[in-house]
Structures are given as structure tokens and as C-alpha cells.
Amino acid sequence: MGTVVGVVLPLGLAFIMFSLGLGLTVTDFVRVAKQPFAFAIGALNQVVVLPIVTFLLVLGFGLGPELAVGFMILAFCPGGVTSNILTRLARGDVALSVSLTAIISLASMITVPPLLALSIGYFGGAAVEPVDIGGIAVKLFLLTTVPILIGLTLHRMAPGVANRIAPLVASLANGVFVFIVGLALVVNWDAFVTTLPILAPSLLSLIIVLLIIGYGVARLAGVPVAQVKTIAIETGIQNSTLGITVAAMLGGYEAGFSAYALPAAVYGILMYVVSAPFILWLRRMGPAKAVAA
């Protein structure tokens, strides 16, 4: 199993990030300079508010060390391709969603390792081995940044080819996501069943609270309604595949999936259940227009 995880998991994440890059253009990055306020609100929610809320929720539910670290891993991972799809379904600002996902994903190789080390030190105590920050940063660079840049370059150099293969790549990426989440649950099935009574309510609470906070902060900021939808989704929807991969990095691929991966794996299922009615509600809010602060 360790060999399977060590091959399938990193390649699967790299392919998913490639699918993200394939849909990007240089304009997506330039757009940040044209919409700095909305981007700043979304980035602040993801990088600062989200980890703080998750930390408080972990303390409130009294989660054990492994689950607590697993929750924090999830909080440090930016939104993935799923947040872009849900934004489109909610009739939000897809361009802003793509910009947030792309830039925060690229920044994850810098932000995730030190935050991860702090979380493990806090919840694990002195007995836990120190985190190899540099090693994890390099792995994240290879598994997230490089595939995104390859996809972006392909789109730049051969837009016709990129546009033709994008739908197939996206479908395959969704299949890879489902496979990874399912594999993580199967491998940790006993731990999953044992922890489900506390894991399910804590994850449901996290998703609901983050969606509400994301919506509330954006609304108070006075951005257009399409951007309110986007910021709410980007705040509440995380990249569970990246979370599972980071969890595997901690335990070593040879050990297979550790309990660190359980929150991200279960989250990968629950986020659709919880977000579906929220997306439908956002969709009924109508076209973009100014929202009073």
C-alpha cells in the first residue's frame, strides 16, 4: 500500500494541479492588479481568517492530536479546481475565483510548511519529530507549482490544443480526486468509523462557519454580489487532495495514509453535501450588482 500511495498520490495531485494550470492565462494574474480590493479580501480570508477559525474550532471540539493536525493541514490548503466550478454554478466572479486559486496555490509552498510545523509543535508536543520544512516546501513546489506552470505554459504556447484537451483533463482530474479520497477512507476505515461521531459534526461545523464568515466578510466589505459569492466559496471550499498529500508527506509515503489524512478525506465528501444548498441559494441572488456594506 505504501508503494501505491507513494506513486498514485503525488502523481494524482500533480495531475489535478496541471488541470488547474491548463485553464489559466497570464490575464488571470494581471487581473489581481485591476481588482486588488476583492482579491485582498479573499486572500485574507484564506490565509489568515480560515486557519484562525479552524484552530478555535479544533480547540472547541477537543480533537486529539492527529485529528487536530489534520484539520490544520486542511485549513492551510487553498481552494482547488472545485471552488472554481462551484463559483461558476453559483454565478459568481469566476475570474476572481481562478485568480485566488492560482496565486494562493502557488504561494502554498511557502505558507504551508512553517504553519504545519507550528501546528504539529502545538498539538503534538515535544515528543513529535520536527517537521522538515525545506523538504516539504520542495515537494509542494514539485507537486503544485511546477504542474500549474506547465499547464499555464501549454495554454500560452498552444491555446488551441489546451482548449481542446481541457474538458477531458478536467474530467480525469475529478476522477483522480474521487479515487484519492476513496482510497484514503478505505485505508483508514477503522479509524474513520471510530472517529466519525466527532469528525462529522466538527467538519460540518467548519464548512458551515467558513461559508458564513466568507459571505459575511465580503458583504461587509461592500464588493459586488458576484464577488461576494466567490469569496464565500473560496473561504469555505478547500483542496482536500492537497491536504491528503501533505498528510502523507508527514508520515512518509511508505507508511500509506495516516490518520492525519482523515479530516481532508471526509471533508472531500462533506463539502459537496453542505455546499450544495448554499450554492443554490447564492445562484438565486441574481446577476452582479453592488452590495451595500
Image (cartoon, rainbow, N blue to C red):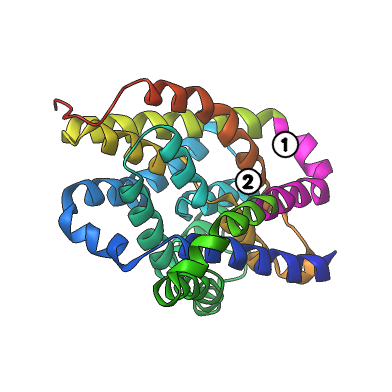
> Tag 2, which secondary structure?
helix
Percent position of residue 163, x then y: 49, 61
Residue underneath mark 2: 67
Percent position of residue 2, x then y: 81, 67
Is residue 29 visible to the viewer in this orientation of the structure?
yes
Give the answer, above or below, for where 105 lies relative to 40: below
Q: Which of 194 and 39 is in front in this view?
A: 39
- Asked if the residue under mark 1 is in contact with the one under mark 2, i.e. CB atoms within 8 Å, the reply is yes
Res 291 label: none
Disc 2 to disc 1, how far (Cα)? Answer: 9 Å
Magenta: main secondary structure: helix
Residue 189 is a magenta residue: yes
Give the answer, above or below, for where 236 lies relative to 19: above
Residue underneath mark 1: 195
User: For this view, does 252 lie left or right of residue 102?
Assistant: right
Percent position of residue 274, x then y: 54, 27
User: For this view, does 123 lie left or right of residue 101?
Assistant: right
Where are the magenta residues, as a range?
176-196
Percent position of residue 166, x then y: 54, 59
Where residue 4 sits, quadrant-wise, is bottom right
**Residue at 41% across / 67% down in the picture?**
106
Crowdedness near tag 2: few (<14), some (14–19) or many (≥20) residues, C-alpha within 10 Å:
many
Type of amino acid at the residue the image marks with label 1: Thr
- Which comes sooner in the sequence, label 2 or label 1? 2
User: For this view, does 107 lie left or right of residue 60?
Assistant: left
> Tag 1, which secondary structure?
helix
Give the answer, above or below, for where 67 lies relative to 193: below
